[in-house]
Image (cartoon, rainbow, N blue to C red):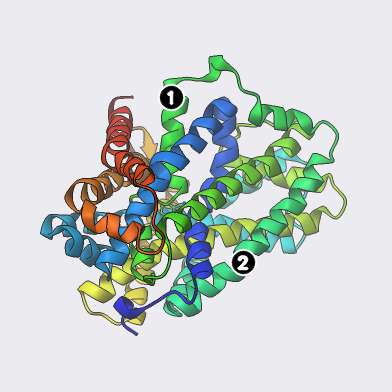
Amino acid sequence: MAATNAQWGSRLGFILASAGSAIGLGAIWKFPFWAGANGGAAFIIPYIVFVFTIGVALVMAEIAIGRRGRGSVVSAMKNVGGKTYAALGAFGVLTSYLILSYYSVVGGWCVSYLVDSFMGAVTTTDADLLKANFGELVSNGTKNIAWHLVFLSLTCGTVILGVEKGIERISKYLMPTLFILMLAIIVRGMTLPGSWAGVEYLFSFKWENVTAAAILNAMGFTFFSLSLGAGILVTYGSYLSKDTCIPNSSLWVAMLAIQASILAGLMIMPAVFAFGVEPNAGPGLVFITVPMIFASVPAGDIFAALFYICLLVAALTSSVSLLEVVVAFIHNEWHLSRRASVILCWVTLFFLGGVSALSFGVWSDITIAGRNIFDFLDFVCSNFMMPIGGLAVAVLAGWKAWPAIREELVSVRQYSEGTIQMIRVMITFLAPVLVLVAIYQGVFG
Ligand code: PHE
């Protein structure tokens, strides 16, 4: 089936797949640590405000461009805005491709910990041993590349099955499972003595914590967490039927994304405090600290396995969305079959991701701007490429093609003129200004 004719099986499937893209390692691994490092509520409140203003407006804009233009992100943007926007669409494809290369390495860590947890080899209270295990995994090139290959292959296998059979099915069953699992882990964590300090750490609002850096980090995280500016929602929107209400679906996606982040914070932070662990342990928080938590609770092995299933599912529904953007592009623009497009990505991403995989080990002394290759890629993608992609979407939807976008937004339900104008102001003015500030901060901050 040509990708241009592909369709979501249902509105729910579309919302869950989009939320699945949003909810990933960003929510479960990055959010708790970032919230902690940026002053708790001083980060969480701006994040929520950004999501419900420019975040949700850009989500609407991306989906509307996709449904209006159809095809890959490149043809959708070209159909809506002309040739210049085709190039900006291609930029989105490149962003997704690059993100996927290193995302797959972290996905590989999740697979590795999942396998270890099934063998009961993860849960121990020996912090030094856990640190050594994590260090061994990330610095061992062979292991790191092998797990990256496993995760990449899982992603490719899902995308080969196609939009409805692959992505939609996996999202429809696994995302609700993820929420239930997280709730179970939260209940366990919150019943540990001393866990309330973690809740306070996440939600106690202190004015002295409100800094420009915290607010700008919250905005960067908004982009990352809603999968904005990388062509994801344009591509997913192009598979959307006319009878789905875009503003309504966008609100759902934003709410689910926020909920996942908050739940992840509640899942990790109380337990971190209950066991006196360092809350801003960075990448180690999930992979080093969490096993300690589970080692100290009854049936910890089972909880650990459940947790890593959550993490893997979340990572997979995001990586699948990244790959779908690239595959839809190759299939539509280069006229390769869907299968051949996936195989091309599988092979090339194996090598490109391999470079990131080695950047914690044998290539760790290769640094660009003070970062190893992995960190540098993440820095460039998150702080520059996604905001630039978001800017392109804002300019196209708000300035160049507003009448068409407006038509898409009200195609199912009539909104009041005030609501429509508010959405327009967010797309046309607020989003570009904030994005430009973020880019400036990224370069000079
Ligand atoms: N939103 C995903 C996460 O939180 C990451 C992502 C970014 C996915 C950009 C797609 C595009 O993990």
Q: Is residue 368 left or right of residue 256?
A: left
Label 2, label 1: how far apart the Cα atoms are: 35 Å
Find residue 284 and report its image quarter: top right
| Nearer to the camera, 351 or 297 | 297
> Which residue bears the numbered disc 1?
213
Name the quadrant of the C terminus: top left
Please tell me which residue is depicted at 17% across the width and 50% down the height of the picture.
Answer: 400
Residue drawn 36% across and 74% down?
342
Measuring from the top left, give residue 141's x and y in whole percent. 48, 55
Q: Label 2 belongs to which residue?
A: 174
Q: Report helix, strand or loop for mark 2.
A: helix
Residue 107: x percent and y percent? 53, 57
Q: Considering the numbered disc 1 on the image, is that residue within a helix, a strand or a loop?
A: helix
Could you tell which of marks 2 and 1 lies nearer the N-terminus?
2
In this view, which residue lies farthest toward the right? 298
- Pointers 2 and 1 in contact (C-beta within 8 Å): no
Task: Out of 59 and 265, give the one closest to the viewer.
Answer: 59
- Which residue lies most toward the top here? 208
Residue 43: assigned label: none
Q: From the image, which quarter does the N terminus lie in?
A: bottom left
